[in-house]
Image (cartoon, helix red, strand yellow):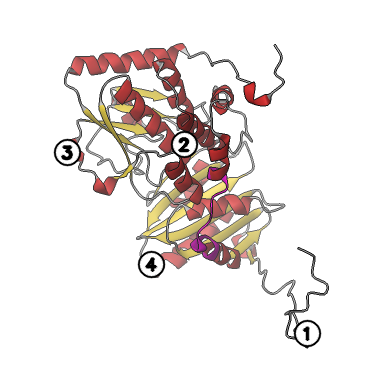
Amino acid sequence: MTTSNASNYRPERPDVSSTTLERLATLGAWLDRRRKRGRWLVLTHDNPDPDALTAAVIIAKILRQRFHQQATVAYGGMIGRAENQALVSLLNLRVSRMRHINLKNYRHVAMLDCQPGTGNTQLPPSLLPDLVLDHHPRRPQTNKVAVHDLRDGYGATATIAAEYLLASELPITRKEATAIVYALRSETLDFSREFPGPDRQIYDYFLSLADTRLLGKIQNPRLPEDYFRTLHEALEHLKTVDTLVTSSLGPVSQPDIVPEIADLLLRMHGKTWSLCSGHFEDRIYLSIRTTNPRANAARIIQRMLGRHGKCGGHGMLAGGWIPADAEVAAKIQLRLERRFATLLRKKPDKMLRLDFASTNQRPEPSLTRSGEVNKAGSPLD
Ligand SMILES: [Mn+2]
């Protein structure tokens, strides 16, 4: 076979695992026993990321087209990142905010990229979903869910959903393929780490079906002024000790900016752990990142928050929140920073402010006699 033109290259359709075929059949049989057509609420975790949004949209399609159900995708919180907003708008993902949803109108609930009892969804604790697809560690309540498929070796829940899509033999649109590709890229941080699951194979196949022009637009969206304002604030509140870097933000306009800053801080040379926190609607949100593939970020955040908060994550990234009024937020954030340092065996008293403003002061440009800015010495555009 010759593949002279890259765009003609089409990887083979990945084999669908027997587990996927079995679970899809289980879901079908379970629905058959219910006879009546049900309305499904397909729920992501709060402040959903591309993985959760994509998995939910794909599963809703399968429920509609393969099982002839009615399905609505919904999420709590906000879609904050500009990339994620672009994902939804450019790919026309049909998703609703939970505040516009009346739970009573739904017979069934599916949970994607999350599980019951974690406190990061809008499902009341008294209600149990009927379907759960997730790649996070198993929670005890999930054992009571009628149909559940947990694969913690997978890099993304969207990979599980993509397998279901292949197994359902429904036609795949370019936009769906694009969403899956973006979900896998962002969730695996561009495959910077290998996963034992079939993520890479699924990714390669769906990339060949994706719209790369739209993908580019999603990955490089226009950023609101507010993003730069928060970035500025984050840079003014950097602290570091040894390989740790932290930033505590005041009130933020949307909680997703907290993990976004944590991601950015981790890129700082010589740093292997980052922590960012910010206050939003009576909660302190915090995110931890590490470059160490053998670390357990989820455990660190759990120990930081104790019983007061809710959190989740994996080895290299974790996030969570604790309730806090605006007046006490800064104090608690400081305590969290110190606890973070202590847990990673650094001395909290050695944490120093990284003050960019006082170093590297750039002289004000001087005006020439004609009133023009003298550009001498500045690099050419
Ligand atoms: Mn996920």
Residue on which disc 4 sits: 326
**Residue range corresponding to the magenta coloring:** 218-229
Q: Earlier in the sequence, mark 4 or mark 3?
A: 3
Amino acid type at image mark 2: Asp
> The N terminus appears in which quarter of the rendering?
top right
Q: Nearer the viewer, mark 3 or mark 1?
A: 1
Looking at the image, do the residues carrying marks 3 and 1 touch, with CB atoms under 8 Å apart?
no
Q: Earlier in the sequence, mark 2 or mark 3?
A: 2
Residue on which disc 3 sits: 104
Looking at the image, do the residues carrying marks 2 and 4 touch, with CB atoms under 8 Å apart?
no
As for residue 368 lying within the magenta part, the answer is no
Give the CA distance from mark 2 to mark 4.
Answer: 31 Å
Give the CA distance from mark 3 to mark 1.
Answer: 71 Å
Going by the image, does 3 lie left or right of 37?
Answer: right
Q: Is residue 312 visible?
A: no
Looking at the image, do the residues carrying marks 2 and 3 touch, with CB atoms under 8 Å apart?
no
Task: From the viewer's side, name the closer residue of 82 and 156.
Answer: 82
Give the CA distance from mark 2 to mark 3.
Answer: 27 Å
Vertical relation: 348 (above or below) 294: below
Going by the image, does 93 lie left or right of 34?
Answer: right
Residue on which disc 1 sits: 368
